[in-house]
Amino acid sequence: MNIADNLEAVRRRIDAAAARAGRIGSDVLLVAVTKTRSPDEMGLAIRAGVTDIGENKVQEITEKFSPVGMLAAKERAGARVKWHMIGHLQRNKVKYIIDKIDIIHSVDSIRLAEEIDRRAVACGRMMDILIQVNTAGEESKFGVSAEDARPLIGEIIEKCRAIRVKGLMSIAPAADDPEDVRKYFREVKEVYDLVSRDADGERLTAEYLSMGMTHDFEVAVEEGSNLVRVGTGIFGARDYSG
Ligand SMILES: *Cc1c(COP(=O)(O)O)cnc(C)c1O
């Protein structure tokens, strides 16, 4: 298992998928998903060129934030890595990560947005978020429906002054054949295209369409994703037993 080789292979597959869609691979941001990985493993990935890391649990972020920050400063000549919160976020935990995270991918309610806003105002920053959209209905618990995404964005822009909405995120249902989830990605892209028409370039931009994980990122990129979240494909299978 060589993280640098895996990373290179994932990047090549992104390039090829982007080319099939008439785009270029460098327009697709690769977020390395590091849940369950140690700071040392994360340091290896950063050494191999990872600039953006994704975590899905508040506790892992608070535990790894400073050791990884130190490793990153060493590997990247002082430049920091960007932290993406990609998992479901409970309102009572926003306060623990508000000063650490660069972007939250999983906003799916006005109440969560208002808590993020309140905490962002308190620490004097703007927070970038994505709206999590769930086009697969019952199969996934979190996220708003395609119809509810734009009304939610409108309400957030109106009520939350310390939030910038930067696009959409989606998690496709698990499928043996990634072709089976193409239709879900396509629906999210349709919403994203409408959002880009609403965009004002400040509080609302269509900068990121976060779709695609290890088993389906090529299909996601073909359908318009410009941010993929890849864990297993870079680090190997996760071991949750520890
Ligand atoms: C774990 C996770 C990923 C990465 O999954 P892999 O299959 O390991 O690539 C991507 N997105 C979210 C929201 C995750 O929780």
Image (tube, grey):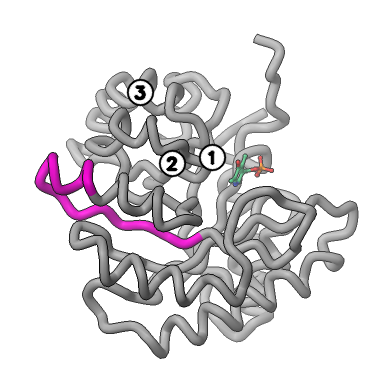
Residue 171 percent across, percent down from the top left: 65, 55
Q: Which amino acid does label 2 sit on?
A: Ile
Residue occupying the point 85% across, 54% down: 175
Residue occupying the point 37% across, 75% down: 154
Does residue 187 show up?
Answer: yes
Residue occupying the point 40% across, 76% down: 206
Residue 108 percent across, percent down from the top left: 50, 56
Side of 187 relative to 163 (left or right): right
Q: Which of marks 1 and 3 is in front?
A: 3
Side of 154 relative to 210 (left or right): left
Q: Label 3, on which residue?
A: 62
Quick check: is 130 in the magenta stretch?
yes
Count of number-bearing discs:
3
Side of 72 relative to 54 (left or right): left
Mark 1 C-beta to ligand 1 under 8 Å: yes
Q: Residue 33 carries which label?
A: 1
Q: Are marks 1 and 2 in contact (CB under 8 Å)?
A: yes
Describe the element under mark 1 as helix, strand or loop: strand
Describe the element under mark 3 as helix, strand or loop: helix
